[in-house]
Image (tube, rainbow, N blue to C red):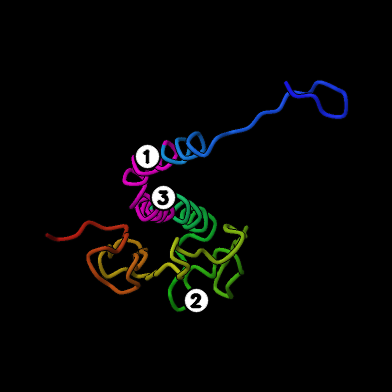
Amino acid sequence: MRKINGQKKAVMGFTLVELMLVVIIIGTLVAMVMPRLSGRSEQAKVSAAKADVSANIATALKLYELDNGNFPSSADGGLTALFTKPASATNWNGPYLEKKPLDPWGREYQYRNPGTHRTFDYDLYSLGPDGQESEDDVKNWESAS
């Protein structure tokens, strides 16, 4: 307690050693946590793309097929048919999606109907982190390895 202007007041102060100790503790905690978090954002993006390909966009495509009797063709704009009625749609009850779906890397999902890998319906995939067709693509078919 110090007397300031005739009144007793509590004064809290930290020494340089105490402040340095806190900085060292925080630095140690950050050093322990950062390696665990590095690479997680890329894993999260891949997981989000898998969810879109296998569930979110796939559900919208199935609803479109239920209403119209077939999946939207690539010639009719592909995935655009899920949020804008194509001329070929006979019983369109959309929009099935609110906007054009983009993958977690900000690129459009690739869609082909008829599919070349899944000839019985459609191919739907993301080009992955590198933006090119390669092994890191997220797709709705199994790779022939």
What is the secondary structure assignment of the residue under circle 2?
helix
Label 3: how many Cα within 10 Å (few below 14, some 14–19, many 20+):
some
Give the distance between the C-alpha atoms of the residues marked 1 and 3, in whole angstroms: 36 Å
Label 1: how many Cα within 10 Å (few below 14, some 14–19, many 20+):
few
What is the secondary structure assignment of the residue under circle 1?
helix
Q: Residue at x 27, y 58 (%)?
A: 141
Residue at numbered disc 3 = 51
The answer to which of marks 2 and 3 sits earlier in the sequence is: 3
Q: Position of residue 44 (x, y in %)?
A: 39, 50
34 or 68: which is nearer to us?
34
Give the distance between the C-alpha atoms of the residues marked 2 and 3, in whole angstroms: 25 Å
Residue type at the position of mark 2: Asp
Q: Main secondary structure of the magenta part?
A: helix
Residue at numbered disc 1 = 28
**Magenta region includes residue 109:** no
The answer to which of marks 1 and 2 sits earlier in the sequence is: 1
Q: Residue at x 51, y 53 (%)?
A: 63
Q: Residue at x 14, y 61 (%)?
A: 144
31 or 51: which is nearer to us?
31
Q: Position of residue 104 (x, y in %)?
A: 45, 60
Q: Which mark is residue 76?
A: 2
